[in-house]
Amino acid sequence: MEQNFGNHSRIVPLFHYFVLPVLGINFVWSIVHAIRNFSPSALLGVAVAAALALGFLYSRVFALTVQDRVIRLEMRLRLQELLSADLRPRIHEFTAGQLVSMRFAADAELPALARKVLDENIADRKAIKKLIQNWQADMLRA
């Protein structure tokens, strides 16, 4: 499948369409149950439901944070190889968000995109991704 701006978001069906909704329903149901049948065990049920939901959400956030750190390192290495001598000293000026957004650019267009992002101080991830003409697919994402 060809990847582009319109379809690059990663959806994991079992996680996004089963686990998260079930955890949400469980949390809401535990609150309803605690209101109807107030007791210490009902309050504990609400706390456990909240902990489960937050635990799964944080596990996703943690995985994405690690992925972004790896992408940041990968992009700095790519830029070190691909940028002209005048731009290499500016690699440290890129934010993590800019680097993560530019990862989809093919090697041939990355130097021009990097210059534009720095010169125009483009920080919006979507705006950077929309500038990419030759999309390089990234199928190994969390």
Image (cartoon, grey):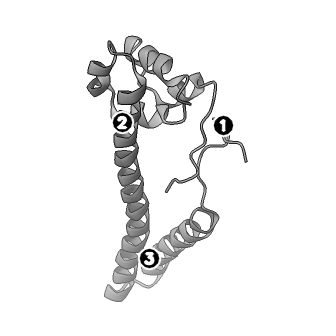
CA neighbours of label 1 inside 10 A, class few (<14), some (14 to 19), many (20+): some
Give the residue drawn at x 39%, y 11%: 119
Left or right, residue 131 beside residue 65: right
State if disc 2 and disc 1 touch (CB < 8 Å): no
Give the residue drawn at x 46%, y 20%: 111
Alpha carbon distance from label 1 to label 3: 47 Å
Expressed as whole percent of the image width and height from the top left, the position of residue 89 reads: 26, 20
For label 1, the SS is loop
CA neighbours of label 3 inside 10 A, class few (<14), some (14 to 19), many (20+): few
Look at the picture and state if 140 lies above or below 109.
Answer: below
Q: Which residue is mark 2?
A: 77
Query: Which comes sooner in the sequence, label 1 or label 2?
Result: 1
Q: Quadrant of residue 71?
A: top left
Closest to the observer: 124 or 43? 124
Expressed as whole percent of the image width and height from the top left, the position of residue 17 reads: 63, 64
Look at the picture and state if 94 lies above or below 47.
Answer: above
Q: Which residue is mark 3?
A: 35
* Residue type at numbered disc 2: Leu
Closest to the observer: 96 or 70? 70
Q: Which residue is mark 1?
A: 4
Closest to the observer: 31 or 21? 21
